[in-house]
């Protein structure tokens, strides 16, 4: 809420993450939905409520008319389009919103989480757009994002010395209904010799290197080298998942690790273990009782080990992760709108949390 009333928000993209953001923006009293961007033809012309499972119409109709959206009085765009499959279009969209004077909270193109380590030509274009529009861009999610910035920083906030920080997503993706993005990018269900996008040169450090640089900066370590390793694991037999049928011998598990070093010493590790079944990659790390979530180790004085398990309303962990991705950005909207123009990370923003659920009168 601002002195002038709720913050006016456009939701851009109503896919896996975006539909959760849309619901929250409609329901929160401190935010006001003023526009919805739709890329899919069958979403254009539909009421926003219909796109996120709410029953009371909002009167806000999804459109693909970007000029009309950006001509509105919106303070902020909540951008959740599919960045990785069209990076140039996504960067153009972000710059266009920023130059039009809209602050942007964004999940797409995860390398944007750490502004100082964004390639200079991209950073310059986005900074120019922020300057022209007097606007601010914040990119985050759950990982990279929340699990790799405020959580480890909170632990290290009570350290005498930090030797290294290790953040590992250990998440069973078999309930992730996302064959087109996560499935295709990670190569699940494809032969092991298919070069899925994640395993092309520079992709892993491009995606998770920013998070390592951000954590290095948080503890005052000068990261001068990134090292990457990865492994894929074949399905021992054919089985079904929310991503589709996984044929015997195709990819059913992915492990990767980015190590960020300072003068040859590991300072930060960002790792993923994503199985589609519990028996995949038996030598890879697991959480206690085979849970899905995150493990954060801060090695130093004292040493911290933290395991995080999360569930959505249905009890499913990937549903919880997708909601968390969207809410990290929706919850950031007031802080991002109040921030100075430019590209920001959690190191530039105050702490913020989701709102207390309204009490019922029963
Ligand atoms: N850091 C993290 O933790 C994290 C976690 C999850 C996702 N992400 C990122 O967040 C972004 C959104 O993820 P998501 O899972 O919500 O994506 P998604 O559901 O696969 O797609 C989001 C939306 O992108 C639009 N879209 C799809 N194909 C398109 C195309 N070919 N051209 C233009 N637009 C297209 C659609 O918009 P309409 O709805 O308008 O049709 C779709 O609903 C991705 O870039 C993803 O990498 C980050």
Image (spheres, rainbow, N blue to C red):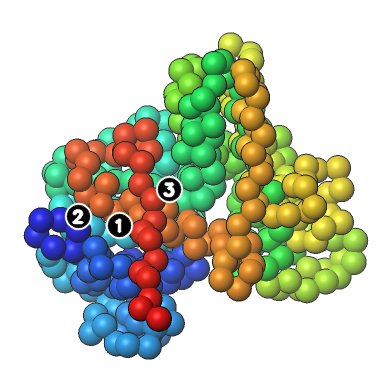
The residue under label 3 is 140
Give the labeled residue for mark 2: 102
Q: CA distance from mark 1 to mark 3?
A: 17 Å
70 with respect to 173 (left or right) = left
Read off the residue under disc 1. 93
- Give the left or right position of residue 246, taking residue 158 as reference: right
Q: Is residue 33 above or below residue 86?
A: below
Closer to the N terminus: mark 3 or mark 2? 2
Depth order, front residue of 21/263: 21
Residue situated furthest left in the rendering: 4
Q: Residues within 10 Å of mark 2 (few under 14, many from 20)?
A: many
Q: Could you tell me which residue is drawn at 42 percent across and 41 percent down?
A: 113
Q: Residue at x 16, y 71 (%)?
A: 68
**Vertical relation: 11 (above or below) 170:** below
For the C terminus, the image quarter is bottom left
Instruction: Check disc 3 and report its element: helix, strand or loop.
Output: loop
Residue 13 vs residue 34, the one in the foreground: 34
Q: How many marks?
A: 3
Q: Is 45 located above or below residue 236 in the figure?
A: below
Instruction: Say what secondary structure mark 1 lies in.
Output: helix
Mark 3 closeness class: few <14, some 14–19, many ≥20 residues within 10 Å: many
**Looking at the picture, does residue 165 appear above or below residue 105?**
above
Image quadrant in which you'd find residue 202: top right
Task: Please name the residue shown 65% across and 24% down the image.
Answer: 303
Q: Residues within 10 Å of mark 1 (few under 14, many from 20)?
A: some
Which tag, 1 or 2, sits closer to the chain's start?
1
């Amino acid at each position: 809420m601002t002195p002038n009333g709720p913050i006016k928000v456009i939701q851009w993209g109503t896919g896996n993450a975006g539909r959760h953001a849309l619901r929250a923006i409609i329901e929160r009293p401190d935010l006001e939905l003023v526009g919805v961007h739709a890329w899919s033809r069958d979403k254009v012309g539909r009421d926003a409520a219909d796109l996120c499972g709410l029953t009371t119409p909002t009167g806000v109709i999804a459109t693909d008319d970007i000029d009309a959206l950006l001509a509105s009085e919106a303070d902020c765009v909540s951008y959740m389009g599919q960045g990785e499959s069209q990076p140039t279009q996504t960067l153009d969209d972000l710059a266009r919103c920023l130059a039009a004077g809209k602050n942007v909270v964004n999940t797409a193109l995860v390398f944007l989480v750490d502004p100082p380590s964004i390639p200079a030509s991209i950073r310059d274009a986005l900074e120019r757009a922020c300057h022209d529009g007097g606007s601010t861009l914040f990119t985050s999610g759950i990982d990279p994002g929340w699990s790799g910035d405020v959580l480890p920083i909170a632990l290290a906030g009570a350290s005498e010395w930090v030797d290294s920080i290790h953040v590992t997503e250990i998440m069973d993706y078999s309930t992730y209904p996302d064959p087109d993005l996560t499935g295709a990018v990670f190569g699940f269900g494809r032969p092991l010799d298919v070069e899925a996008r994640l395993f092309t040169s520079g992709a892993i450090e491009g995606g998770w290197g920013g998070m390592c640089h951000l954590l290095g900066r948080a503890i005052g370590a000068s990261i001068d080298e990134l090292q990457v390793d990865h492994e894929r694991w074949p399905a021992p037999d054919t089985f079904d998942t929310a991503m589709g049928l996984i044929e015997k011998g195709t990819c059913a598990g992915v492990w990767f690790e980015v190590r960020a070093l300072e003068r040859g010493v590991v300072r930060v590790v960002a790792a993923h273990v994503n199985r589609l079944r519990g028996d995949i990659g038996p030598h890879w790390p697991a959480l206690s009782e085979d849970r899905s979530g995150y493990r954060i180790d801060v090695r130093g004085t004292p040493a911290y080990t933290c395991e995080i398990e999360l569930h959505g309303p249905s009890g499913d962990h990937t549903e919880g992760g997708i909601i968390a991705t969207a809410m990290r950005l929706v919850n950031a909207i007031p802080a991002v709108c109040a921030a100075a123009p430019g590209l920001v990370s959690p190191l530039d923003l105050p702490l913020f949390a989701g709102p207390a659920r309204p009490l019922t009168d029963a």
